[in-house]
Image (spheres, grey):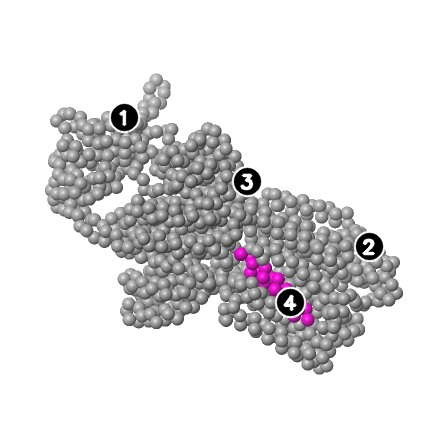
Amino acid sequence: MELNFSGRFVGKWVNSKLTPLFIVVSLLFGYFAFTYIAREEEPQIVVPMVDIFVGLPGAGTEQVENRVIRPLEKLLWEIPGIEYIYSNVSEEQAMVIVRFRVGEDLERSLVKITEKLEHHKDRIPPGVVGPIVKNRTIDDVPFLALTFWSRTYGHDELRRVVAQVTDHLKAIPEVSATTLIGGMPRAMVVEIDPVRLAGFGVSAFEVMQALQGANAKFGVGEFDRADQRVSVMAGGFLRDRGDVEQLVVAVRDRKPIRLLDVAAVRDATDEPDNHVFIDFGPAAGTVMPDVPEALRQGGPAAAVTLSVAKRPGTNAITLGDEIRRKLEVLRRTVIPEEVQVTTTRDYGATAQEKADDLFTSMIQAVVLVMIILFLTLSARVALVSSISIPVTLALTLGAFYLLGFTMNRITLFALIFSVGLLTDDAVVVLENMLRHIGMPKNRGRVKAEIAQEAIHEIGDPTILANIAIVLAVMPMALVSGMMGPYMEPIPIGTAAAAMLSLLVAYVVTPWAGIRFIQFPQLSEADLQDDKIPDSVFERFYRTIITPLVRVPKVRFVFILVAVGLVIGAALLVPLQFVKVKMLPFDNKSEFQVVLDLPEGSTLETTTAAAMDISDYLKTVPEVTDIELHAGTSGPFNFNGLVRHYFLRRASHMADLQVNLAPKTKRTRQSHEIALSVRASVQEIARRYRANAKIAEVPPGPPVLQTLVVEVYGPTEEGRQALASQVRQLMAQTPGVVDIDTYTEEDQPQTLFEVDQAKAALLGVSPDQIAQTIRIGVAGAVVGLMDMPREREDVALLVRLPRPARSGDQAILALRVTAPATGRSVTLGELATPRRKIKDKSRYHKNLQPVAYVTADVAGAEESPVYPILDLVKTLGTLRGPDGGGVEQWHTRVPFETTSGYAVKFDGEWQITYEVFRDLGLAFAAVMFLIYILMVGWYQDFITPIGILLPVPFSLAGVLPGHALLGAFFTATSMIGFISGAGIIVRNSLLLVDFIIELEKRGQKLEDAVINAAVIRFRPMVLTSLSTLIGATVMLSDPIFQGLAIAIVFGELASTCLTRVAVPVIYYQIEKVRRGL
C-alpha cells in the first residue's frame, strides 16, 4: 500500500529513539516557559496614546481654540494611523489626546508626532508655550502602591520619609516610574508684609528680583596661570534660612534693607494643595493582621502613597517580592517605627492569585478529562490518550512564550479552553489503531505497520478537521479596537493547541500505543474487517439514527423540530430572556469613588465631602481600607489611564480608593458591593452639590464611561443646551445612573485691567504689574535652594500671608517701583479689578466641537444596549436649539456639524457594537473559509453545505443555557459559539469522510450512513464530553462564564441534535442528488 503523508510521517516516529526524547524535551520546554514567562493580571494591549500640552498665557478659551488647537488638530490629522483626536480647551492652555489604532508601533507613533510638530514649528503662533509631548502606555500604570501612614507624623514629614524610600527603590533595575502622592515638599517660603514693605518703600517685585539675583551661579570663563587653565565661577546659591533672611533686598537712605525687615521666612512647606488620608473598614484584619487594631481604629490617618510602575515585560510577581524585601531592610534604617506601610495595590499578588486559581482550574480540567477517558475507554488506552495532554499543554505554553505573550488570565483561560481539544486527535488515532489491529487481515503483522495504515486511513481528514478548527478561531483575532488584542490569546492558543495536539497524536500516540496497550485476543465472531461496535451506547444510538435515515416522515419531523428549536432559542434575545452585554464585571477587590464638587470649591470643602463618604464606606463589612485623595488623584489603573484620572488635580476634585477583602473571604462580589453603596454615596455627595461616580475596574478594555452621548452642533451654546436636554432624558431612563456632563459650574473670576497709558507715563511695565499681582495671589517660585541632602527640590517661594490673599484690597495695596525714577505707586493706581465669569472648557473629537453627557448603567439590565434603545425613541422627539430635528449617529462621528445638531452614542456601546459586528463577520468568514476548504477537499459544492447546515443547531443549547443560568450573552459567549462551531465541523468532517470510505468498500448509502454514524459515535461523544468538562471549570468566573455556557450547553445540544443531524442531512442531500 502506498501511504499518504500522514502514514509516512508516523512511520518516521513510531519506532524512533527520538520520540521519547521529544516527550521529555517538550515537557522541559513547557516547564521553562512556565517558569520564565512574565506574569501579569491583564494582557498587554498596544494602543499608542500621546498627550500634547500647549499654553497661550492670558488667552481666553475661544482664542486658544482658534489660534492653537484648530491648526494643531488639522496638522495631527494628517498623520497616518491615528484613530481619534480628543481636545480639551480652557483658558490659557489646552490638551490634545492622540490615540492611534490598536497595534500601531509605540515608538514609531511617537516619532510621527514629534517629527510633524518639529517640521512645523514655524507655524506656531507667537506667545505659545510648548508643545509638550508625553507618551502614555499600559506600562505607565502602577502595579504597586505603598501607602505610608502614621498617627504621629504629619503629611510633610511622611513625604520626606517616602522620598528617601523612593531613592532606594529606584535602584532596583526593573522599577520604572515612581510617584509620590500626598504631602508637600519642603520649601523656603518668604511671606512679605505689605505694611512693612510700604514703610520701607520697597516693592514686592524688588524682593523677587533680589532673591533671583542672589540665587544665581554660573561659569564666566577661564584664564591661564602658571601653565594651568583656571575656570572661573561667579555668584552663589542660597543655602539655608539664614542666607535668605540676611539678604539685602534694597537700599534706602544709604541703609541696607534686609529681607527679614520686610518679610517672614519659613523653612517648612508651602500651603497644602492636597490632602491624603487612609482609614480602615471592618475587614481590615483579614489583610493586615500585623497592624494593631488600636492603630486601625483611630480614624483617618495622614498618609502619603508611593506608586511604582514596572518596565515593559517585567514579571510583576518577582518585582513585587523584591520591593517588599527591600522595604524590610529600609524599616531598620530609613522608615521610623511610628510609620506604618500598607500595600494598597499589588497587581503582582493579584496576578499570582489569579494564575494560581486558573492553574488549579486547568489541572482540574485535565484530571476531569482523564477521568472521562478512563471511564469510557480501557485503562491503558485512556493512559496513552492522556499522555497527549501534558505534552501538548507544555508545547502550547512554549508557543505563548515564543510569541511574546505574558501569563495573564486570558492566556490561562485559553489553555483551559483548549484542554478539551487536546485528546481528540489522540483518541481518533487510537480508536482507528485498535480497529485495524483487530481486523483478520492484520493478524500476525507488525504493529508499527498497522499503525501507519490506520493513520493513513484517517490522516488526511484529521488534518483537514484541525485546519477547520484553526479557520474557525483565527478570525476572532482580527476583531477591531482594543477587544481584538485583549482576547487574542484565545484564538491563538486554541489554534496552537489544535495543531500541536495533531503533531503529538502523530508522534507520541502511535509510539506509546504499540508499546503500552495490551491488544485483546479477538473471537471468531469479532474477526470482521468492518466489525460494527455493539456496546450499550452504540445500540442506543442505532435505535435513534436508523428510523431517522430509513423513514422519511420521521426524518422530516426531526429536521422540523430542530429548526423550530433554533428559531425558538433565537427569539430569546429580542424577547430579552437573554440579554446582550459586552462583558460582565469581574470579581475584583477594589473600586473607586470619583468625586467632583462645583468648580471653585475650596480644598477644605472637598476634603470634608470625601471624609463623609469615607466614614460611610468604612461601615461596609467587606471594606479593608480606604485611601482618600482630595485635590490630587490616587494611583491610576488602566481605566484611569484611558480616562486620564492622573490629571485630576484641582481643589474641587477628589477620589477614594476602596479596597475589599479577598474574594475568598467574602460572599458578595465586588460589583454587588459597588451597587449597594452607590445610593448612599450619592446622597452624601448631594449635600455638597457634588457629583459622585462609582468607578469599577472594567472587565475588558476601558472606555470614557459605560454610556456616553456626544452632542454635536454649530455653536457652543447650542451644544450645551442640547446636552442639558439629553441629561434630563437620561435621568428619566430606567437603569441609567451616575449622570454627568463636562459642563462646568460658573466660577467667579477677577480680571485686573491695567491702565496702560498711566503705567507708561510712570515707567512701570505691564509685566512688572502682572508679576506683582502673581506674588499677591498665588505666589511666585523664584528659584531653588541649594540643599543637596534633600531628596526633592526645595523651592524658594515669595507670597503674601494667607489672610492678605482673601480679597482685592490687599493686592491693590501692593506697591510697584519705576526702575528709572524710583517712584513707588500702589497697584490700585494702575489696575482696576473687574468681576467676570471664568471661561468654560470646550471639547473636540476628531476636529469636531462636541459636548459630552456620560452615565453608568445599573439595575436589572446593566448593559448600555437597552437604555440606548430607550433613548433612541425619546431622543427622536428632541428639537435642536435651531428648531430642527436632532440626527442620531450610532457608530461614527458626524462628518459635518455646522448646519445642524446631532448626537452620537459612544462608550461601552461603541465597543459592544464593534465586537459583535466583527465577531459576526468573523463567523461568516469562518463558514465561508471552511466551505471553500471542503469544496477543495471533496471537489463538490453540495456536500460541504450538508456539513455546515447543522452548525446553528448548537444555538438551541447556547441561548437557553444563558437564560437558564440568568447570564448575559457576552463577547466571550460569541467566542464560545464560534469555537463550538469549529468543533462541530471537525467531527462532521470525520463522519462524512468515513461515510464516503464505507461506500467505497461496497456498502449502500443507507447502510454506510448508519454504520459510520455508529462507529464514530463514541469518539465524537468523547470529544464533546472532553470539551464540555474542560469548560465547566470556567463557569464560576464572571468574565468567561459566557464562553463556558456556550461550550457546555452548545456541546449538549450538539450531542443531542448535531450528532444526529449531520448523517440525516447528508443522507437527505445525497438521496435527492442521486435520485434515490
| Residue 1014, quarter of the rendered image | bottom right
Q: Earlier in the sequence, mark 4 or mark 3?
A: 3
Expressed as whole percent of the image width and height from the top left, the position of residue 285 reads 49, 42
Closest to the observer, 887 or 868: 868
| Label 4, label 2: how far apart the Cα atoms are | 33 Å
| Label 4, label 3: how far apart the Cα atoms are | 45 Å
**Residue at image mark 2:** 518
**Residue at image mark 4:** 1054
| Label 4, label 1: how far apart the Cα atoms are | 86 Å
Q: Which residue is rendered at x = 84% and y = 67% of the image?
A: 528
Amino acid type at mark 2: Gln
Q: For the magenta stretch, what is the residue range?
A: 1038-1060
Q: Is residue 1055 magenta?
A: yes
| Label 3, label 1: how far apart the Cα atoms are | 48 Å
**Residue at image mark 3:** 318
Expressed as whole percent of the image width and height from the top left, the position of residue 109 reads 44, 51
Expressed as whole percent of the image width and height from the top left, the position of residue 444 reads 87, 58
Picture layout, residue 987 above or below residue 382 = below
Picture layout, residue 946 above or below residue 205 = below
| Label 1, label 2: how far apart the Cα atoms are | 96 Å
Q: From the viewer's perspective, tell me whether residue 1029 is left or right of residue 882.
A: right
